[in-house]
Structures are given as structure tokens and as C-alpha cells.
Amino acid sequence: MVWLRRAIGVIFATAVAIGAGLVFLTVAALADPVTRAAGFALIQFAVWALADADIVDGLNGGGLSALTGFVWMAIVTVCAVPVVAVASIGEVAQSARAFLV
């Protein structure tokens, strides 16, 4: 049952690390003036592009769902994928060490 306790610990630690990364990156982006200006410009561009698409295609163009999907993909790519990759590599290394010793 040691493996179950370890698995639960890794899952909990991964969830905490992803949440902390999300909070830290948001605070860092808001604190840095260059990143804040770039983020504001990107949001402004996305809103205007979405408004233009709604004017041309009508309200059922699917632009908002595409923008939401892109933002979700960016958050997962930046915050979750590195943490999960490092946790997986660490668990494989732990298993290999236990197997070799």
C-alpha cells in the first residue's frame, strides 16, 4: 500500500504545483510593465477580432468558443504540462532506482 500513498501524494503535489504556478505567473505578468502591456494588447486584439467576426459572421460564428479553447490550451501548456512531465520523470527515476538497488 506504499504505492497508493505515494500516488495520492504525487497527485496532490502536482495539483498544488499547478495552482501555485497559475497564481505566480498571473501575479508576475501583472507586476511586470512590459508583460502587462503586451497582455493588454493581446486581449484588446482578441476582443476586436472577436467583435469583427461577430459582425461579419453573425453571433453563431463560434469565435468565442475558439478564443476560450485557445486560452485554456495556453494555460494548460504553460502551467500543467511541465509539472506533469517533471512528476512523471521523477516517478520513473524513483522506480528505476528502487529496481536497481
Image (tube, helix red, strand yellow):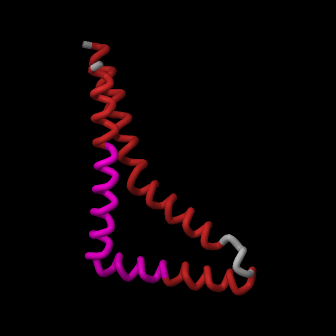
- Asked if 1 appears above or below 76 in the picture, the reply is above
Predominant secondary structure, magenta span: helix
- Asked if 28 appears above or below 44 in the picture, the reply is above
Over which residues does the magenta segment extend? 14-43
Q: Is residue 65 on the magenta stretch?
A: no
Front residue (pair 89, 13): 13
Name of the residue lying farthest toward the right: 57
Q: Residue at x 74, y 84 (%)?
A: 56
Q: Quadrant of the C terminus?
A: top left
Q: Quadrant of the N terminus?
A: top left
- Asked if 59 appears above or below 88 in the picture, the reply is below
- Asked if 55 appears above or below 8 in the picture, the reply is below
Image position, residue 6 (x, y; %): 28, 28
Q: Is residue 23 on the magenta stretch?
A: yes
Horizontal arrangement in the rendering, residue 9 relative to residue 46 (left or right): left
Q: Residue at x 29, y 49 (%)?
A: 16
Horizontal arrangement in the rendering, residue 27 relative to residue 71 (left or right): left
Give the number of marks: 0
Front residue (pair 4, 48): 4
Image position, residue 59 (x, y; %): 70, 79
Image position, residue 84 (x, y; %): 39, 42
Q: Residue at x 71, y 74 (%)?
A: 61
Image position, residue 97 (x, y; %): 28, 20
Instruction: Using the rendered view, name the quadrant where residue 20 is placed.
Output: bottom left
Instruction: Using the rendered view, name the quadrant where residue 55 is placed.
Output: bottom right
